[in-house]
């Protein structure tokens, strides 16, 4: 049976470094700044949950937390999204040296993402 775990959560931020500091101080999360991508990664205290702070933009509006679900076949899942009445917002694309993702909208309008790691033991 396929794992369908939540594998990554993105919280848009007007200032990604300040957001990292805020959540580190609030929750004790480990923070890793990635200035070349204008992105800050976070890791929850137990090391099982991960995410990041992307810069607020049209693609990542404030208030729209993006949840990534593990997928073994992003293309097949995106086809199924459309078959079930959802809409594909971003076809499968590579995150260099990390993995692949795709973004969709469910019939209600909620936006979620699919993710496959280049390092399968991290799924």
Image (cartoon, rainbow, N blue to C red):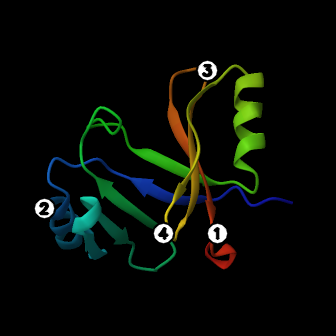
Q: Residue at x 49, y 48 (%)?
A: 67
Q: CA distance from mark 4 to mark 2?
A: 20 Å
Residue 49 image offset from top left, x and y in percent: 48, 69
Residue 59 image offset from top left, x and y in percent: 35, 35
Ranked by sequence position, the earlier of labels 3 and 2 is: 2
Are the two marked residues, 4 and 2, in contact with CB atoms closer than 8 angstroms?
no
Residue to which mark 2 is pinned: 18
Ranked by sequence position, the earlier of labels 4 and 2 is: 2
Q: CA distance from mark 3 to mark 2?
A: 34 Å
Q: Residue furthest right?
A: 1
Compared to residue 16, the image places residue 30 above or below, namely below
Ranked by sequence position, the earlier of labels 1 and 2 is: 2
Residue to which mark 4 is pinned: 49
Ranked by sequence position, the earlier of labels 1 and 3 is: 3
Residue to which mark 1 is pinned: 123
SS for dot 1: loop
């Amino acid at each position: 049976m396929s794992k369908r775990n939540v594998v990554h959560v993105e919280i848009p931020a007007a200032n990604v470094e300040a957001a990292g500091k805020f959540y580190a101080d609030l929750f004790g999360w480990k923070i890793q700044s990635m200035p070349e991508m204008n992105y800050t990664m976070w890791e929850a205290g137990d090391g099982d949950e991960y995410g990041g702070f992307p810069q607020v933009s049209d693609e990542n509006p404030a208030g729209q937390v993006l949840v990534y679900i593990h997928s073994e076949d992003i293309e097949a899942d995106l086809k199924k999204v459309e078959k079930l009445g959802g809409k594909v917002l971003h076809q499968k694309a590579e995150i260099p040296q990390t993995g692949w993702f795709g973004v969709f909208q469910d019939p209600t309008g909620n936006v979620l993402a699919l993710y496959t790691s280049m390092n399968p033991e991290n799924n």
